[in-house]
Image (tube, helix red, strand yellow):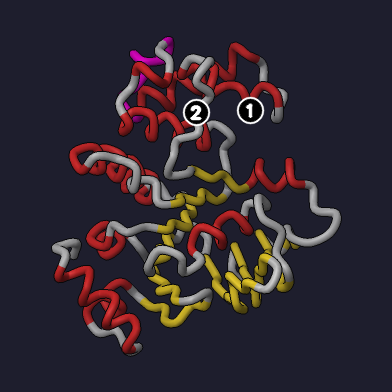
């Protein structure tokens, strides 16, 4: 039994089948990267794992517990599975410190003093402790995304979902965000990540899954997927990536 199991996940919007029976297993402390063209279902899959979208069929299990379907406690689920989006989604009227401590105080019931101490420690880890009193519009995109990651980490999740977290950033800001993810992976956090950063996936991932039109067409080690893919669709996708200088 894997730590995080996605079993035959289907997701439809009316007649549009976005996910067509995806099965994907993530072991504890693994980094699994989802790659594929825009529209292949990566973001929808992550949103299903976090309960932001309701799956049409199949089931999702975390540590052996079913965390999908009728009657699931979404607040409890989101305490266990954190998610970071490409668009930061910070509260603009709150300081960095307030953004990071809001959920631990409101959802986990942590004392404000303790929540702020933990937040400052996490901000220090990503080099942003001096920005604790700043507001999102006073930060660069890379800094905002680092705060978004810290906000997710402040809930001490068992799994962290990362949804194209560098796609909204200028190229020079990408590295500072990916370095944080690299450190989290080295620390053993379980990560499921949708990304267009192929070189990063090749370096950091334990497993890479290529999604195409709502199915996992191919999955394997980074070496196998990037150096010797077996599926023609995977080969064509990576050829375009190489032509664009992204790998």
Residue at the image point whose x is 37% and y is 68% from the top: 37
Q: Which mark is residue 80?
A: none
Q: Residues within 10 Å of mark 1 (few under 14, many from 20)?
A: some
Closer to the eye: label 2 or 1 = 2
Q: Position of residue 155 (x, y in %)?
A: 59, 35
Q: On the rendered image, what quadrant is the N terminus found in?
A: bottom right
> Circle 2 sits on which residue?
90
Name the foreground residue: 238 vs 32.
238
Q: On the rendered image, what quadrant is the C terminus found in?
A: bottom left
- For label 2, the SS is loop
Q: Position of residue 10 (x, y in %)?
A: 66, 73
Q: Main secondary structure of the magenta part?
A: loop
- Part of the protein shown in magenta: 126-133
Q: Is residue 247 left or right of residue 8?
A: left
Residue at the image point whose x is 29% and y is 84% from the top: 229
> Circle 1 sits on which residue?
103
Residue at the right extreme? Answer: 71
Residue at the image point whose x is 71% and y is 29% from the top: 107
Mark 2 to mark 1 CA distance (whole Å): 12 Å
- For label 1, the SS is helix
Report if residue 200 lies within the magenta region. no
């Amino acid at each position: 039994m894997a730590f995080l199991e996605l079993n035959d996940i289907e997701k439809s919007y009316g007649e549009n089948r976005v996910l067509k029976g995806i099965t994907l297993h993530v072991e504890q402390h693994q980094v699994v990267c989802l790659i594929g063209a825009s529209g292949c279902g990566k973001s929808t899959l992550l949103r299903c794992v976090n309960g932001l979208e309701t799956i049409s069929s199949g089931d999702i299990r975390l540590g052996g517990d079913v965390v999908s379907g009728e009657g699931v406690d979404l607040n409890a689920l989101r305490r266990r599975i954190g998610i970071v989006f490409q668009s930061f989604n910070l509260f603009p009227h709150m300081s960095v410190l307030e953004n990071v401590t809001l959920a631990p105080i409101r959802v986990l019931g942590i004392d404000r003093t303790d929540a702020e101490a933990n937040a400052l420690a996490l901000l220090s880890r990503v080099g942003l402790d001096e920005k604790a009193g700043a507001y999102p519009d006073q930060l660069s995109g890379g800094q905002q995304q680092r705060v978004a990651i810290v906000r997710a980490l402040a809930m001490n999740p068992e799994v962290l979902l990362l949804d194209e977290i560098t796609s909204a950033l200028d190229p020079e800001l990408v590295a500072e965000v990916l370095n944080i993810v690299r450190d989290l992976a080295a620390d053993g956090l379980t990560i499921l990540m949708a990304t267009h950063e192929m070189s990063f996936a090749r370096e950091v991932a334990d497993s890479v899954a290529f999604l195409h039109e709502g199915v996992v067409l191919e999955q394997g080690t980074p070496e196998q997927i990037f150096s010797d893919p077996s599926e023609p669709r995977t080969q064509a996708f990576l050829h375009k990536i190489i032509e664009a200088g992204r790998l």
